Amino acid sequence: MEIVGVIVTAAWAMLPAYVPNNVAVLAGGDKPIDGGRTLGDRRLLGDGKSWRGTAVGTAAGLALALLLSELAPTASDLVGHQLPTFPVLAGLGLAFGAMLGDIAASFLKRRTGRERGAAFPGLDQLDFVVGALACVRLLSPEWTEATFTGPVVLVVLVFTPLLHVVANVSAHAIGLKDEPW
Ligand code: CTP
Ligand code: MG
């Protein structure tokens, strides 16, 4: 596949993983997943990881995957490349995995002494990508191998941090997010 095909495939296939954490920012705020528990003298995860944010974010990512599946034929014609449809398990793996990666990062942040909202450069930009790819690989292995070829994964790993920075600085600028990361 040539480079344009690789890039449009990467962007398309990752959309259900990009959306959940952003929707969680809008939906979050109820009961924390860790129930206020601590490990040592710090919270297990913190108030920034809520049940509602996680559930609504995951549902939004899955819904988007199903919508993209419907649009795939038309979108493929438009860009001149065969874009993948998403089996339910693939959509779920991408969406829930993205949330899980972000939750795991919060766990690491608290263990390394970072308060809620503190930045952890590198981890902040890639936690959800690693979570999404690991989870979708587990839930839908054949689809994942066919879709996320070596070059596609490479493009995802290079472009996602850039996209993440732009999205979060924008969300902060318009007042949706407390911090620009
Ligand atoms: N959010 C949520 N549930 C999640 C992820 C996010 O409710 N699983 C909501 C929370 O309101 C959170 C906001 O989205 O404060 C921003 O998310 P994020 O930046 O990931 O959390 P932080 O508050 O920065 O907390 P942490 O330092 O633990 O990442
Ligand atoms: Mg944060």
Image: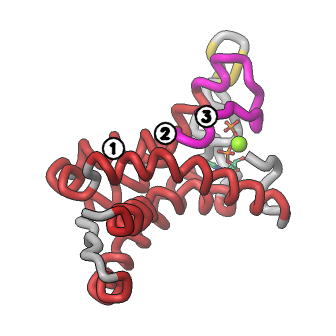
- Please say whether residue 13 is visible from this viewpoint: no
Q: Position of residue 156 (x, y in %)?
A: 44, 51
Residue that protrudes farthest toward the left in the picture: 142
Which residue is denoted by mark 1 in the rendering? Answer: 135
Residue at 61% x, 32% y is 106
Q: Image height check: is 87 above or below 134?
A: below
Element at label 1: helix
Residue at 29% x, 77% y is 81
First in sequence: mark 1 or mark 2?
A: 2
- Mark pair 2, 3: CA separation: 13 Å
Q: Indicate the quadrant of ligand 1 in the picture.
A: top right
- Cβ at disc 1 under 8 Å from ligand 1: no
- Mark pair 1, 2: CA separation: 9 Å
Which residue is denoted by mark 3 in the rendering? Answer: 122
Q: Is residue 110 inside the magenta stretch?
A: yes
- Which span of residues is magenta-colored? 108-126
Kind of residue at badge 3:
Gly
